[in-house]
Amino acid sequence: MKSIYNSYINSFKGLSREVWWLSLITLINRAGTMVIPFLSLYLTQDLGFTLENVGIIMSCFGLGSLIGAWLGGKLTDMFGSYPVMLVSLILTGVLFLILQYLNSFWTICAGIFVLMIIADAFRPATFVALSAYSKPENKTRSVTLIRLAINLGFSAGPALGGLIIGILGYRGLFWVDGLTCIAAGLLLLVLLNPKKVKVLDSIENKMPLSAYKDLPYLVFIIAMVLFGFVFVQYFSTIPIYYNDVHTLNETQIGLLLAMNGFLIFVFEMPLIKFMETRSLSKISNMLIGLILVTFSILILNFTTWIGVLVIGMLLMTLGEMIAFPFSNAFAMDRARRGRQGEYMALYSISFSISHIFAHNSGMISIARLGYETTWYLATFIGLLGILLLLLLKKILLRNSRK
């Protein structure tokens, strides 16, 4: 047990103080966005909107997220990561406070749209800052630490949010969300002020390449969009499948989803530390991750045994733990060739695209074709992503020989 404990602790060693501070700020920021999980309930129960209205508002949410990631990348390349992160956190907090006073359908559409533009400008700036604060050999584990902070924030946020709603109502939730975002901004101002922090990996590129002209990177981005299409089914269509086909109740479904977050929190960092000692490339690790996630959905068609749901969740979680850190690290490495903000924005946008289209297409497929056909279609999309990663590996190998 002692050797296991020491191995676990060692997996966190070597990361810079700045990466730890950035993870703390991310944790506070993500735990503070408690409104998001309860947004549909707030709109229907508190404001009395129809489901059709909520669908349009959530589309504004997704579109704002996409534009925010793009804009954040552009602004990061122009002004640097620090001012973009600082302004994003402070303004997001202010907008959360304002949002509670919007009551009409169109003002809420506009408010959510603007809020997500400002809030998601934070993401590409964070990745660029993370790259600067990390030694090259530690980038994948630095990304993993940020993912741990995000997962902890998303786990703690809804639990705290439910308590706050019960005690203070939805308006209390907006106040807490707004103030925690502002607090995260103030922490950034104090802890990661450019005058105090140490940059470990500075990049000087006099002729930066546009991410949109980097063919291998575009192949990678399309593969990530396809990966996202498969992955997000676990947070939209598959919970419905658990209930409809296997008659799981909300508590049982919640436990299955909670297992995902718990396993990531406990095992992701040691797993990444172990995989970094292997001779596999980042693309090879991404392939392993995507294969596991794709297979986790395919096996749902193999048997009606309820245990397959646990096996599927374990495979998906393992695939997610491998694919996300190495894909993020690949994007940061590739960004050294050009405009870093633009590169990291495109990486964030790939998953925004998946969120905008994958949930609705999965729902429509289930309604019209049923679960079995939908899982086969998701498997096909995953296979296309795998083929694109194999193509990317071939392109990079050929370019390295030139």
Image: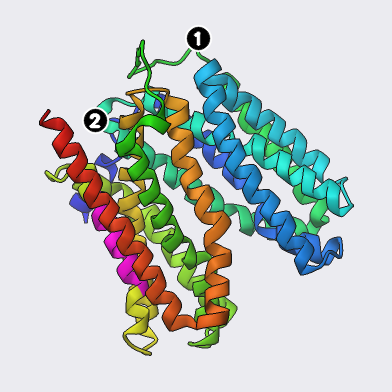
Please state if 184 lies on the left or on the right of 163 as rendered: left
- Residue 159, picture quadrant: bottom right
Instruction: Specify the amino acid type for callout 1.
Output: Lys
Element type at marker 2?
helix
In the image, 166 versus 113, the foreground residue is 113
Please state if 180 lies on the left or on the right of 70 as rendered: right
In the image, 142 versus 374, the foreground residue is 374
Instruction: Specify the amino acid type for callout 2.
Output: Glu
The picture places residue 235, in percent across and down from the top left corner, at 52, 65
Judging by the rendered image, the residue that carries numbered circle 1 is 195
Please state if 271 lies on the left or on the right of 190 as rendered: left
Q: Quadrant of the C terminus?
A: top left
Nearer the observer: mark 1 or 2; the answer is: 2
Extent of the magenta region:
285-297
In the image, 124 versus 166, the foreground residue is 124
Between discs 1 and 2, the one toward the N terminus: 2
- Is 392 drawn above or below residue 208 in the view shown? below
The picture places residue 45, in percent across and down from the top left corner, at 82, 66
Q: CA distance from mark 1 to mark 2?
A: 25 Å
Judging by the rendered image, the residue that carries numbered circle 2 is 137
Element type at marker 1?
loop
- Is 301 drawn above or below residue 133 in the view shown? below
CA neighbours of label 1 inside 10 A, class few (<14), some (14 to 19), many (20+):
few
The picture places residue 135, in percent across and down from the top left corner, at 29, 25
- Is 149 drawn above or below residue 312 in the view shown? above
Q: Residue at x 32, y 36 (%)?
A: 215
- Residue 302, picture quadrant: bottom left
- Residue 330, picture quadrant: top left
Q: Residue at x 79, y 58 (%)?
A: 167
Magenta region's main secondary structure?
helix
Question: Would residue 294 be counted in the magenta stretch?
Answer: yes
